[in-house]
Structures are given as C-alpha cells and as structure tokens.
Amino acid sequence: MMSSDQAKSMAKKLRAALGAGEIDVTHGKALELVAASLGFADWNAAKAALAPTALTAPDAIEFTSCNPIIRFFDEAKAREFYCGFLGFSTVFEHRFTEELPLYMAVQRAGVQLHLSEHHNDASPGSNAFVPTTNIRAFHRELSEKNYAFNRPGLEKMPWGLQMQVHDPFGNRLRFCEQGA
C-alpha cells in the first residue's frame, strides 16, 4: 500500500513537472490532484486512508490537521467572505433545528475552517494562522476580485511572507508562506 509520504512525493513531482511546462499550481492543489488520481475525494481523505509513513510507528501520536473554529454573526456575510472572496467551498452545514445557530465547515486547498454562530464556540476577534504555498498567486487572485471590504497586502515577516485578511466579524486569518 502507498504511504502518505509517497503521495506527497508524487505531488511534489507533479508540481515540478507542471511548473516546467509553465503551469503553476500550489502544493495544496497538487496534493488534491494526487488524491483524486488515487480515487479519494480530497487530500484529507487520502491522508487518513493511506498507510502511515515508515518513520511513524503505528501507535505514535500524530496530529494530522487542525481546524480552527471561527465565530460569525451573519450567514450571508460569512458566505460572501469565505466562499465568494476567499474561494472556499462548503463541506457541511449543521443546525439542530431551523431556527437555531448554524455550524458549518468550509475548505480550500487542504485547509478546513469551521464557522459557528454558537456563542460558546469561539470569541470574536480570533486569529488563525494558515501555512500557505504560492502566497503571491493567492494575493493576486484576491486583489483581482476588487472586494470592497478587504484589500490585503503582503508583508515580509521573520517567519515568512504573510497576507492578513479580516472577516466581517473581527476575526483575522494570517496566510503565510513560511521561508519566503
């Protein structure tokens, strides 16, 4: 059985091959393409199903991802910002009943954010740090949208090139290409 390290290596080689042909894809997109070619819905499903790496003992603790919970107050504004502006797509939505608050997840390129209207799930004004590849392309994509409420810039930080966006609810997402 293929390991997740082998699939990551395939994604790296795919990205390099496409780049040689002047087709630029992010590492996250390459992972998603490899996952699809192996028959998985997305990279998270592939990583969960693929054999552990040779370096990881079967009983070793491994944190495979982190899904921050972000508080929001208006469903339409949240969808406009996270799906319309940032380009995420909805993974799931949950309400205990129609009149109760919404809890949903959105994802893009390997990262999943949980968005909640429930007052105990998160505090407004939170920060989420999102490691990112090809941040300049993502910045260009967002800049070309001319979104009236957010025009993020790129900032060189000691840990990498960072783009900070503010959602309509006072939360900040810091997308960062580390080492860039």
Image (cartoon, rainbow, N blue to C red):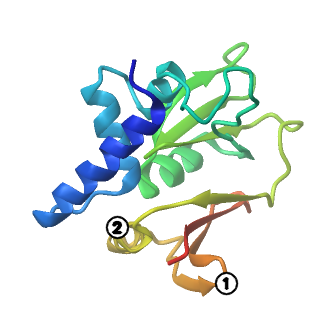
Give the answer, above or below, for where 75 lies relative to 15: above
Amino acid tagged 2 = Glu
Above or below residue 88? Residue 50 is: above
**Quick one: 125 or 56, which is closer to the camera?**
56
Tell me, yes or no, whether the two marked residues, 2 and 1, touch with CB atoms within 8 Å: no
| Label 2 neighbour load within 10 Å: few <14, some 14-19, many 20+ | some
Residue 122 horizontal side relative to residue 92, left or right: right
For numbered disc 1, what is the local secondary structure? loop
Observer-nearest residue: 4 or 162? Answer: 4
Whether residue 2 is visible, yes or no, is yes
Q: Horizontal and vertical percent for residue 4?
A: 46, 32
Residue 72 in picture, x, y percent from top left: 71, 46
The dot on residue 158 is: 1
Q: Which residue is depicted at the point 86% across and 50% down?
A: 123
Q: Amino acid at mark 1?
A: Pro
Q: Secondary structure at mark 2?
A: helix
- Which is in the foreground here, disc 2 or disc 1? 1
Residue 54: image x %, image y %?
55, 31
| On-image quarter of the N terminus | top left
Q: Quadrant of residue 166?
A: bottom right
Q: Nearer the viewer, residue 109 or 48?
A: 48
- Identify residue for label 2: 141
Give the quarter of the image for residue 144: bottom left
| Residue sticking out furthest to the left | 21
Which numbered disc, 2 or 1, marks the residue that appears first in the sequence? 2
- Residue lying at the far front of the rendered structure: 54
The spot of residue 51 in percent (x, y) is 50, 22
